[in-house]
């Protein structure tokens, strides 16, 4: 094991920062917020290829490189360093090439260029997830430079998009469907898209929902002739949340996995058609999500939410009203308030196997490099990994950015943390050789 770690050495920090500067320089063009902002991930793929292509098999090197594109300008990159034993594989997956949006007016520095402030590396994507793209690129480059003989094949998969990947048909789900994940089942799969240098042993499922509320609009001076859709929506949502927390309370296993929050259901957006202050709206839409710990079933929750809405529609008179003329039924006009609920793509969270080989080598490497192991869980979501686990993959998650700046303004990571991440990867590879 010592020989492997000695050969792989430490992170080439100058090379890492140089590549990261190029990647962050593209962050303006890889913001992901359809339909307004469609990322062009190939901008970052090209920078990675500039580093790794000289070591590709096409140029006489050891790396097998596949640039997989399902949509123009939105490529994925799969890089393989072949080992000698076809039954031994270790993979580093999930480093996505897009970023969340950033408003420069709300930042203390330019989000779309890398700022170096001592150990701080600042810019959109440093923590999530372009820092990891640069880190794993440097690992694959070092493997190719040293031509170290390994039993395990080392595979890196850089993905085009984290959010809406399967809907857009361009990222991990498309790769999985086409079989690019098949041989990863032969060994631990490390999903590199979390933070704080510790194993993230649990993630949340997500169920995006939309509640459309229908009443009757009227002049505010005659509220007795209206069904106020805003009031109906507020009361209906309150009742739905009450029932949700009754049916899906904190689960006992959440303490074992150190989840910071239990399952939650909450609104995050509110829309209505507009109008003056003297108009009572006849319709509105409330959108939000459920974040679900992995000990509950997503399909069970969706079924329950639909049941809540069906029951509320059948018993709309039972909902609390607001004031002496507030109501949700106008009998003389044969009008009843109502609502409907719909769902966008949902996926389940994951509870990592704490007895697996993958967790054992990650835990040992973390203790060895960082000095301690404090696994944690969050109800943030990651795509695909629950499905992979259900199919028998040894999925573990970790990352080396700063959780407090994840998706936040003034995002940054620490060069020291990324250097330790490289050492963790080297230790994992070395342990698997033994």
Image (tube, rainbow, N blue to C red):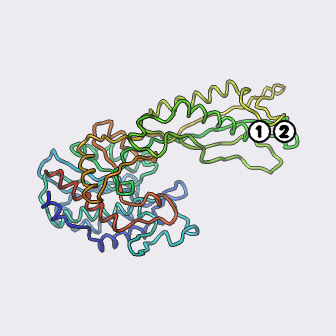
Q: Which residue is mark 2?
A: 223
Quick check: marks 2 and 1 in contact, CB under 8 Å? yes
| Front residue of this view, candidates 321 and 26 | 321
The residue lying furthest to the right in this view is 221
Which image quadrant for residue 80?
Answer: bottom left
Q: Secondary structure at mark 2?
A: helix
| Residue at position x 42%, y 52% in the image | 162
Q: Give the image location of residue 368, x and y in percent.
A: 24, 57
Q: Give the image location of residue 395, x and y in percent.
A: 30, 44
Q: Earlier in the sequence, mark 2 or mark 1?
A: 2
Q: Quadrant of the N terminus?
A: bottom left
Q: Residues within 10 Å of mark 1 (few under 14, many from 20)?
A: many
Q: Secondary structure at mark 1?
A: loop
Image: 175 above or below 144: above
Q: Which residue is mark 1?
A: 228
Image: 56 above or below 235: below
| Front residue of this view, candidates 373 and 430 | 373
Cα distance in 3D space between marks 2 and 1: 8 Å
| Front residue of this view, candidates 263 and 337 | 263
| Residue at position x 45%, y 34% in the image | 251
390 left or right, relative to 114:
left
63 left or right, relative to 405:
left
């Amino acid at each position: 094991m010592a020989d492997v770690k000695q050969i792989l050495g430490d992170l080439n920090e100058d090379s890492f920062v140089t590549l990261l500067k190029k990647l962050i320089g593209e962050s303006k063009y890889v913001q992901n917020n359809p339909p307004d902002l469609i990322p062009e991930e190939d901008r970052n793929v090209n920078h990675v290829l500039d580093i790794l292509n000289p070591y590709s098999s096409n140029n006489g090197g050891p790396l097998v490189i596949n640039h997989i594109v399902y949509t123009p300008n939105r490529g994925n990159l799969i890089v393989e360093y072949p080992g000698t034993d076809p039954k031994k594989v270790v993979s580093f997956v999930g480093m996505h090439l897009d970023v969340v949006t950033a408003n420069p007016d709300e930042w203390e520095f330019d989000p779309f260029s890398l700022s170096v402030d001592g150990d701080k590396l600042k810019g959109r994507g440093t923590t999530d997830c372009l820092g990891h793209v640069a880190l794993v690129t440097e690992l694959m480059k070092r493997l190719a430079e040293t031509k170290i003989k390994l039993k395990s094949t080392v595979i890196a998969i850089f993905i085009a998009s984290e959010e809406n990947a399967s809907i857009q048909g361009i990222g991990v789900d498309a790769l999985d469907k086409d079989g690019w994940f098949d041989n990863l089942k032969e060994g631990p799969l490390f999903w590199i898209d979390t933070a704080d240098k510790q194993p993230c042993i649990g993630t949340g499922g997500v169920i995006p929902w939309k509640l459309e509320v229908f009443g009757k609009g009227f002049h505010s001076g005659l509220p007795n002739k209206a069904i106020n859709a805003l009031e109906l929506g507020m009361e209906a949502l309150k009742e739905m949340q009450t029932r949700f927390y009754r049916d899906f309370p904190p689960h006992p296993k959440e303490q074992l996995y150190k989840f910071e929050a239990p399952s939650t259901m909450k609104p995050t957006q509110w829309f209505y058609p507009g109008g003056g202050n003297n108009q009572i709206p006849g319709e509105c839409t409330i959108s939000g999500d459920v974040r679900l710990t992995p000990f509950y079933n997503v399909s069970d929750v969706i079924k329950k939410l639909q049941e809540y809405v069906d029951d509320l529609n059948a018993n709309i008179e039972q909902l609390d009203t607001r004031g002496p003329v507030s109501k949700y039924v106008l009998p003389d006009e044969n009008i009843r308030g109502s609502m409907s609920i719909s769902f966008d793509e949902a996926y389940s969270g994951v509870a990592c196997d704490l007895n697996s080989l993958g967790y054992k080598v990650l835990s040992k490497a973390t203790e060895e490099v960082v000095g301690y192991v404090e696994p944690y869980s969050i109800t943030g979501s990651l795509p695909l990994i629950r499905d992979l686990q259900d199919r028998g993959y040894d999925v573990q998650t970790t990352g080396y950015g700063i959780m407090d700046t994840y998706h936040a303004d003034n995002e940054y990571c620490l060069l020291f943390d990324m250097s330790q991440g490289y050492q963790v990867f080297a230790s994992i590879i070395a342990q698997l050789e033994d």
